[in-house]
Image (cartoon, rainbow, N blue to C red):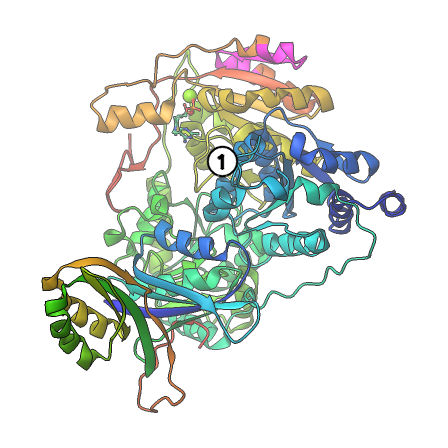
Amino acid sequence: MKAEAAQKVKTAPRTGADLLVDSLIEQGVDTLFGYPGGAVLPIYDAIYRAEGSFDHVLPRHEQGAIHAAEGYARVSGRPGVVIGTSGPGATNLITGIADAMMDSLPVVIFTGQVAKGVIGTDAFQESDVMGITTPITKHNYQVQQIEELPRVVKEAFHIATTGRPGPVVVDIPKDISSKVHEKDVESTFHLPGYQPTVHPNPLQINKLHDALLQAKKPVILAGAGIIHSKGSEDLQNFAKNYSIPVVTTLLGLGSFPGSDELSLGMGGMHGTYSANRALYECDLLINIGARFDDRLTGNLEHFAPNAKVAHVDIDPAEIGKNVPTTIPIVSDAKAALEALNKRDAAKLDHQEWLDKTNKNKVEYPLWHDDYEDQISPQWLMKKVHAYTQGKSIVTTDVGQHQMWAAQYYSFHQPNKWVTSGGLGTMGFGFPAAIGAQLASPEASVISIVGDGGFQMTMQELSLLQERKIPVKVVIVNNQALGMVRQWQEKFYEERYSHSLAQSQPDFVKLAESYEIPGYKIETKEDLERVLPDVLNNDQPAVIDCRVMQMENVYPMIAPGKGLHEMIGVTR
Amino acid sequence: MKRIVTAIVHNRSGVLNRVTGLLSKRQFNIESISVGRTETEGVSKMTFVVEVEDERKLEQLTKQLNKQIDVLKVSDITDKAIVARELAMVKVISNPQIRSEIQGIIEPFRATVIDVSRESMTVQVTGNSDKVDALIDLLRPYGIKELARTGLTAFTRGHQPQVAEIKSYSLLK
Ligand SMILES: Cc1ncc(C[n+]2csc(CCOP(=O)(O)OP(=O)(O)O)c2C)c(N)n1
Ligand SMILES: [Mg+2]
């Protein structure tokens, strides 16, 4: 069908917009997340002509489009594609573009622009998309001539998806998308300034191998780079061959099975004691595809103070940025792991270390309170895990519920965990779940959101209604901006400034107004009754789950503190 | 420490914005930037004089620049044998009586007078930044009405002495 549609377009008048649509088809785009408007009318007309070539998803706010595209990219590894109009359409996309940049997600964004002749005159719905998006994109283009459009689109997809993935914006003036073009256009490109190093330097691999043979306390820090490079199996082999315990970052969850005996869980601000202790005490830290974010490292002065640091990253600029590195390895994570796995993994002598990390794991597990008559959010996460056997795609919003999901939904597989790590964008979780579900229609997708963040993008319930997208929304309703409230409790002497007093809609009625089944859950029994049912049908659902309001996320490293200064490790 | 860094860039629209934006976003202290076309069509060269705290900051700077798609090559040429020039124009308050005095001052700098009016004269000086600074300091007591500097532009000499330690910030080398 796709080829046929492409054929059809080719016989029609060839506008710039047609060239764009052809290029998208050539890139194998199957889903577009977009919102029309004046400056993209020619593009929407071309989309109309190319009906059937791909699915166009119309969110109810451009932010929904871009977060959906991010969710799509995160679970499929394919680029998310977004279209927005000029001016407000483009500016509504900004949060998502910044989010994709921080979390290295391949997203290609097309924005309409006013006609070239009026750019710079403060024309109606003009905004300086190039200026605004330059600091938050891997690269951006404003198409200057119709002839370059196909090449620019190809470059944009290439740049977004290779090396360290990231968002690329293509700004298309309206006169270019509407102009008719007769001749065939050349679309081959050459990017001499962009040649990512994919394969590791063997000498550096030797150095790491030597360091491994000498290490008494090695630990692996597994980041999302492993997932991007599809290197999870290689990581498992590597960790097993050398018997090295594995700490995952927030975004690296799923790169290594949480249930594996070598897994120490997540590190960082709300990481496990065993993970943070291992990072603190290790003598060799092997960072694979993580960027030493400050939420992971805590105070850098106390981060891995006695360790030799090896860092595998496809982005050379990440190596040595935050943590001095002895063994830099510029490489794709999978390629580096493959190279390491080819070396002789002579059994290392570090049983003592393994015993110690294991002991920490057993003696200081995550803990939480349980209540007779109320639901503790951690208990809720465990239940969600149990009922889905840890196999669902889980998206979250940002806040306490995000941390609890990260702590308690132990992932076995990569590409199942969709969360906003670097930017910490409230409003991300729900639209991201829609994108994730569209990318993998057969999967079970659960969106765990806070009562606050859900209200930022809940208008996308329309999409569930319209398309019968079976996303299950679980609102972890603590009737609070919980994470803010927790910080106010801990660091501002319980002055709950604007984190508690807020009204809420009736989420059940809200869901029902979109013809989506809604459930209000107040007791454990309610949940145990409703959740399995909901998970077993192929309908969307909104579950408003009331949880203990004053619950805190523990353990925790207070801001400015080191990994060895965790609080709330035990009850 | 002060470093001279050059970047060869693809002359596409937005590249200057991307590069300067990146420098300010990452809080690099730029003393001067100069940009101009090169011998190759479509390729420009930027010369930055930057003040960085330490080697690590400097490494970040070159890596972040290198990461930009339209940046073709980044070099820290501070420790190399280079030719570096900057041009400055200084409008000095001067009545006819002290004009010749000023002439005498600027002569050893091989600066030239390019404009004269009743109350002022404009001096043009070319050289490395220290030389330009030195002349400006000497002219300051007379009263500087206006000052414009181009920023430094530089490249390596045709012949590099073998002993010169050439710093490389590429991880691949
Ligand atoms: C767009 C945006 N605004 C503000 C914040 C700051 N912030 C971080 S967590 C949080 C509270 C979130 O509340 P809720 O969604 O109810 O989740 P909870 O922490 O209660 O689980 C806020 C306001 C943010 N991360 N993103
Ligand atoms: Mg809340």
In the rendered image, the quadrant that contains the N terminus of chain A is: top right
**Disc 1 C-beta below 8 A from ligand 1:** yes
**Identity of the residue drawn at 75% across and 61% down:** A186
Q: Position of residue A570 (x, y in %)?
A: 29, 34
In the rendered image, the quadrant that contains the C terminus of chain A is: top left
Quarter of the image holding residue A389? top right
**Identity of the residue drawn at 57% across and 52% down:** A228
Q: Is residue A52 visible?
A: no
Nearest the eye: A506 or A309: A506
Badge 1 density bin: few <14, some 14–19, many ≥20, Cα 10 Å: many
> Chain letter of disc 1?
A
Left or right? Give the position of B121 relative to A269: left
Left or right? Give the position of A397 relative to A212: right
Instruction: Provide the secondary structure element on which disc 1 rests.
Output: helix
Task: Tell me, yes or no, whether the highlighted magenta stretch contains residue A500.
Answer: no
Q: Is residue A54 visible?
A: yes
Count of numbered labels shown in the rendering: 1
**Identity of the residue drawn at 57% across and 41% down:** A119
Check disc 1 and give the amino acid type: Thr
Q: Position of residue A420 (x, y in %)?
A: 48, 38
Residue located beneath label 1 in the image: A95
Q: Is residue A282 above or below residue B41?
A: above
Task: Tell me, yes or no, whether the highlighted magenta stretch contains residue A519.
Answer: yes
Quarter of the image holding residue B40? bottom right
What are the residue bounds of the magenta stretch? A510-528
Nearest the eye: A366 or B55: B55
Q: Position of residue A280 (x, y in %)?
A: 29, 53
Q: Is residue B57 above or below residue A484?
A: below
Q: Position of residue A129 (x, y in %)?
A: 53, 41
Quarter of the image holding residue A424? top left
Q: Is residue A65 above or below residue A192?
A: above
